[in-house]
Image (cartoon, rainbow, N blue to C red):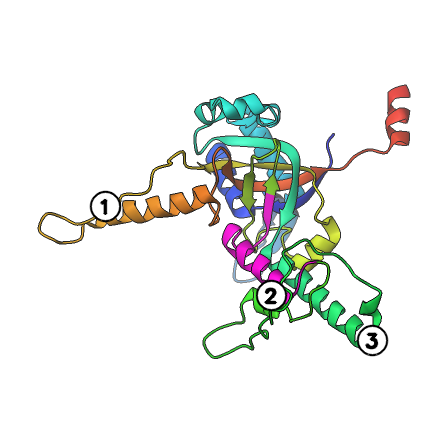
Amino acid sequence: MILREFLYVDTDKVRAMLAQLDGGIAEESRETERKEKRTTLGPRVAGQYFQGTGSETYTNKSLGDALFPTLEDALESESLLRDVSEEVSDPQQWSSGELRRALPPGSLIRITAMGSLFDTRYAASAFSAFGSVVMGLNDLGYMQTVKPAIQGKSRQGQQGRTPKQKTADGPVALEDSIPDFPDIGGADGKTLRAFVKVSKGVFAPGLHVNLTPVEGVLINSRLQEGRQYLDSESDILFARYGTERQEWTVVGSIGSYGTEETSLPNMEFHNADGTVNRAKFADSMNAQMRNLGRLGFIDLPQQPGFSLIPFAVYRSIPRSDAVAVTRRHE
């Protein structure tokens, strides 16, 4: 039996798919048994005797963690779910385009691979905390001997801007939570704010699971907030799971692949009479966004990788060596 530690379960989607497969989801059972005996003595108006017995059993069973494994088993029994963990770890499958041909968008797949979590909000929070620590140590006189290195281009001689305060126009931008501090080890407050600006475009703020089964290939899943288990703030999730690569399993459907287009988009969207052709305009704008995704500037799949719409994200709970040895000898 495989024990799973779930990071995320889209319970709404899981229930909807189970309903299609089984015609409904059994989440409760009820048994009712009743025996009655009626005896009437004399005129009804004078009086009557009634004796009744009955019993009722009611059980409300929440499927909880069993909900997704139920769907997983049902999909596998119908040959609708395919485990492609071995295929995605083979560079040849990516370079030949075989994966794209064998797994069109909409395919239901399971992937177990090395990956990591990423959230631009956490990056901004971490850099903001780092800046505060640096400023505090500087005020205490410790920075003369403590020089933590941050990889980035030095901006000596440039004065960083002061973080903005919240205005009536809207909330403070993520990068503006990072204070100014002098250059240390090749980075200052302005450099770290620039990293967060890039992060906001490359990965839209929110929790992402980035699987990298092959160097240079990204399979991205963005987790929707408000679903089961994903109920913690980003800083709590990263404090628990860290930023290191570890083995994750993602089950879901393929959303889309990175574009293979290399030419610049055609922005001709006018009709012969000078009016705007709405269909051509939408196609032109989508082509522009695909091109930005190809460049890695916005949160879209980048060729040859693809996006994965997650039903569940989990990691397997390993058995201890002592338990494994005991079970082998039994």
Please provide percent x and percent y for residue 12.
52, 47
SS at mark 3 in the image: helix
Q: Relative to 270, say whether 157 is above or below.
A: below
Task: Identify which amino acid the numbered label 1 is placed on.
Answer: Lys
Asked if residue 78 shows in the view, the reply is no
Position of 2 with respect to 256 (left or right) is right
User: Disc 2 on helix, strand or loop?
Assistant: helix
Q: Which mark is residue 140?
A: 3
Quadrant of the rendered image containing residue 321: top right
Which residue was labeled with disc 1?
280
Name the residue type under label 2.
Lys
Q: Secondary structure at mark 1?
A: helix
Mark found first going from the N terminus, 2 or 1: 2
Q: Nearer the viewer, mark 1 or mark 3?
A: 3
Please name whichever residue, 133 or 233, is drawn nearer the observer in this view of the structure: 133
User: Residue at the location (91% across, 20% down)?
Assistant: 329
Say whether marks 2 and 1 touch (CB < 8 Å): no
Q: Which residue is mark 2?
A: 190
Q: Residues within 10 Å of mark 3 (few under 14, many from 20)?
A: few
Which range is magenta?
A: 186-209
Q: In the current view of this chain or complex, which residue is farthest to the front?
A: 157
Q: Residue at x 73, y 59 (%)?
A: 185
Residue 248 position by quadrant: top right
Q: Determine the residue located farthest toward the bottom in the rendered image.
A: 168
Crowding near the residue tagged with mark 1, few <14, some 14–19, many ≥20 C-alpha atoms within 10 Å: some
Of the residues under marks 3 and 2, which one precedes in the sequence? 3
* Vertical relation: 43 (above or below) 76: below
Q: Amino acid at mark 3?
A: Leu
How far apart are the two marked residues, 1 and 3, measured between alpha carbons? 62 Å
Does the magenta portion include 198?
yes
The image shows residue 64 at horizontal and vertical percentages of 65, 45
Residue 213, numbered label: none
